[in-house]
Amino acid sequence: MSKDDLIDSLVADLTPVDKPVRAARRAMLWWTSAMVVTTIAMTFIAPFRSGFVEQLVTAPRYALEIFVGFLTAALLARATFELAVPDDNQQRWHVRIAVIITAVWLLLLVTAYWSPVLPPSMAGKRPHCYAEVMAFGIPLTMIALVQLRSMYVLNPLRAGVTAGLAGGIVPAFLMQLACMHDPWHILTHHIAPLLVTATAGAIGGLLLLRKRESLTDQR
């Protein structure tokens, strides 16, 4: 058998390998869609707080708070999808950065309780903002989990919790622009519901991603 024949026989039964999953692209698509759709839906429920654009220009600490919140939402989305790619170093890097920025954002919100970035006001108060965070956050979480099913999640619980935080933080962040700006109200009505979305994500992760985990273990 010639060398060429040997090579042909070795590769004859091979099947094409799927292209590697692009976690960053999927994360960006999910996050962008989530932000746009949630913004539009929230606007239909009630208008965003009047004057928030001017506040971004005239109150640097408020602008910083919004910027870090925006960054937090994007990084949590990226971390969620990176957790579905079996690469420990990549996962750890993205998750650590997301955790650090999230902690910075929460610290800014807590600090504002003692040193408000804006004068506390009832302007723009949405009657059921806490319910809106959950009503938008849980479906966004489930959509993310459904997308993760086609990937290779090794830890369904961790991926589910991260997806729950990523899903919940989208409406929670937008509430900073849409709802009344009062530090205690923000913590209790915008941030606290993330515990619900994270719990929903954990349960959803165990139910929706368990099959993928078992398939991975069998290989």
Image: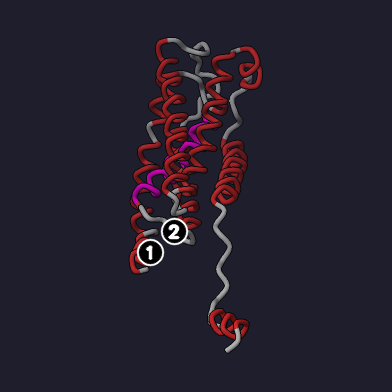
Query: Magenta-highlighted stretch: main secondary structure?
Result: helix
Q: Residues within 10 Å of mark 2 (few under 14, many from 20)?
A: many
Element type where label 1 sits in the image: helix
- Is 174 within the magenta? yes
Which residues, given as a range, are shown in magenta?
157-175
| Residue in front for this viewpoint, 146 or 152 | 152
> Which mark sits nearer the N-terminus, 2 or 1?
2
Q: Residues within 10 Å of mark 1 (few under 14, many from 20)?
A: few
Residue beneath label 2, please?
A: 152
At label 2, the amino acid type is Tyr
Q: Residue at x 51, y 25 (%)?
A: 125
Whether residue 128 is visible to the viewer of this picture, yes or no, is no
Which residue is drawn at the image coordinates 35% and 52% (left, top)? Answer: 155
How many numbered circles does the render carry? 2
Q: Is residue 138 above or below residue 100?
A: below
Q: Which residue is mark 1?
A: 216
Q: Position of residue 102 (x, y in %)?
A: 44, 30
The residues tagged by marks 2 and 1 sit, at their Cα atoms, a distance apart of 7 Å
